[in-house]
Amino acid sequence: MIKIRPRGGESIQQVLKRFKRLCQREGLTRDVKRHSYYEKPSERKRRKQRKAVRRAQTDPSLMRT
């Protein structure tokens, strides 16, 4: 759970900016988007495989020989 307490003299905009940054760092926004609709297990597996392929293409040390 993310908790934010305003520091002394901190404006609402600054507190909100810190909150958004923490949510993004924790992956909360990504998680909410992913769970906003039902994803079939086969689609989830396909998404994970595509992510692994993309990650392997960008990092050559992950590729098998």
Image (cartoon, grey):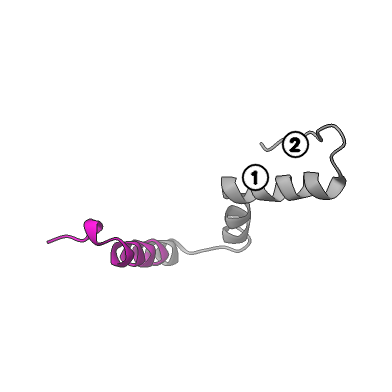
Q: Quadrant of the C terminus?
A: bottom left
Instruction: Return the x and y of residue 8 as percentages of the image width and height.
Output: 85, 32
Instruction: Please state if 52 lies on the left or on the right of 19 as rendered.
Output: left
Task: Name the foreground residue: 14 vs 32.
Answer: 14
Q: Label 2, on which residue?
A: 4
- Place of residue 5 in the rendered image (x, y in percent of width and height, measured from the top left): 79, 33
Question: Where 12 sits versus 3, above or below?
Answer: below
- Residue at point 31% right, 66% down? 53
Residue with the most extreme front position:
9
- First along the sequence among labels 2 and 1: 2
Q: Give the range drawn in magenta.
A: 46-65
Residue kind at label 1, given as amino acid type: Leu
Outermost residue to the left:
65
Residue 22 shows which numbered tag? 1
Front residue (pair 17, 49) = 17
Q: Position of residue 25 (x, y in %)?
A: 58, 47
Location of residue 50 (image quadrant) = bottom left
Q: Nearer the viewer, residue 36 or 56?
A: 56
The answer for how far apart the CA atoms under marks 2 and 1 are is: 9 Å
Task: Residue 18: name its quadrant.
Answer: top right
- Which of 11 and 42 lies nearest the eye of the viewer? 11
Residue 43 sits above or below residue 10 on the image: below
| CB-based contact (under 8 Å), mark 2 and mark 1 | yes
